[in-house]
Image (spheres, rainbow, N blue to C red):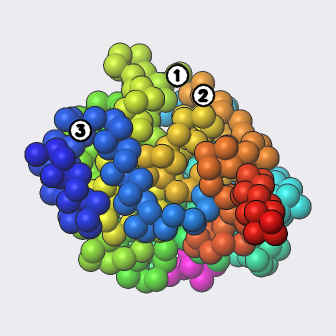
Amino acid sequence: MVKQLLHKAIAGGRLDFAEGVELFNEASLMDLGYAANEVRKRFHGDNEPITYVIDRNVNYTNVCDAYCTFCAFYAPPGSDKGYVLPYETIKEKVTELIEFGGTQLLLQGGHNPELGIEYYEELLSRLRTDFPRLTLHALSPSEIDHITRVSNISLQDTLKRLVAAGLTSIPGGGAEVLTDRVKKIISPLKIPAARWLEVMEEAHKMGIRTTSTMMYGSVDTIEDRIEHLIKLRELQDRAEGFTAFIPWSFQPGGTPLGKKVKNLTTATEYLRMVAVSRLMLDNIRNIQSSWVTQGSGLGQTAFAFGANDFGGTMMEENVVSAAGTRCDVTLDEMIRCIHSAGFDAAQRDTQYNILRVHPRQIARSEESVALAASAV
């Protein structure tokens, strides 16, 4: 039965919930990898490069009243450890990004009860004025929902005002695992699954492109994860707008939840997660590996399990590192990882348009051998 399901996915058939669970639990790792790689080729061909984006992650505030048990980054309202970055500090960080050749600003923060819609309008509009060519990939669905509540305005009005101020696209943070069972345990005060999906669907209907994510490995089951994937797929059917899916594992260090969760995820489980995501998400074109949480070696290995994108250079990362995980990777190292995996590397923008290609040196060597042979 497992072989039949793998062939079904390779041929473009849609896997249902039970089939996804069976594949995750029963298929061998190598079979999953082979099938996911074949599906990747159906989306991207044999010769498309592995992509990356030059970006920076700026956390404009760490003040948050959601108190998620998996987070080691936030400071509660009133804490002397809380901050809201001055605009000049953000501008300096973005200037460095532009000087490095960056095209995307990933702007995220906590649920700060002191910040209403006017704060975000001013921040986005100033960034758009100072950096008109920069893509503002900003504010997760949970932050957007928080803005609606603090400002007492509708979701649609919130999105319209943010877009008018400069918002370009929305990152998929705050999804965790999109089942109420999981969310009630790990983030009971945060946006519920249905609301996360509602924010994204409204954004898609307005023409705003977004990414989708999953943070697995806390209290979730395999069934929870497959349900999450199907919810994303169904939303993409109703209102297309997801450009990519990014799974990563829970990082327990320094978190209240980490003191309770004993069965931490493995490298093998990560590769299974990437592969099954590629097989299930038949209407989301791109699967991104997560070097930030998994390290460059495992992120590179994911290219053989259905991933076609290496994510962003980030330049700065605070949330995952607050949990004790640091996987700093330079741009040169990212390109080297892609090349050594057997692919050309390509810089992309937020919408996956190719900006620059770095061909593998081996490809040039092979071409030289072919030319020499033809000359003889």
Task: Tell me which residue sits at (33%, 35%) in the image.
Answer: 29
Task: Tell me which residue sits at (31%, 48%) in the image.
Answer: 276
| Secondary element at image label 1 | loop
Label 3 and label 1: CA atoms lie apart by: 31 Å
Q: Tell me: residue 133, above or below residue 214.
A: below
| Secondary element at image label 2 | loop
Task: Give coordinates of residue 59: x percent, y percent.
Answer: 65, 49
In this orientation, does residue 144 appear?
no
Whether residue 161 appears in magenta in the rendering, the answer is yes
Task: Tell me which residue sits at (63%, 37%) in the image.
Answer: 296
Q: Which residue is mark 1?
A: 253
Task: Give coordinates of residue 99: x percent, y percent.
Answer: 89, 61
Nearest to viewer (mark 1 / mark 2): 2
Nearest to viewer (mark 2 / mark 3): 3
Nearest to viewer (mark 3 / mark 1): 3
Q: Tell me: residue 6, above or below residue 300.
A: below
Nearer-the-camera pick, 128 or 10: 10
- Asked whether the beta carbons under mark 3 and mark 1 sit within 8 Å of each other, the answer is no
The amino acid sitting under disc 3 is Ala
Give the number of callouts. Answer: 3
Q: Earlier in the sequence, mark 1 or mark 2?
A: 1
Q: Which residue is mark 2?
A: 325
Instruction: Tell me the crowding category of disc 2: few under 14, some 14 to 19, or many 20 or more residues within 10 angstroms, Cα based.
Output: some
Q: Which residue is mark 3?
A: 27
The magenta-colored residue range is 160-165
Could you say which quadrant of the image residue 241 lies in? bottom left
Q: Earlier in the sequence, mark 2 or mark 3?
A: 3
| Secondary element at image label 3 | loop
The answer to whether residue 129 is left or right of residue 299 is: right
The amino acid sitting under disc 1 is Gly
What type of secondary structure mainly makes up the magenta span? helix
Which quarter of the figure is the C terminus placed in? bottom right
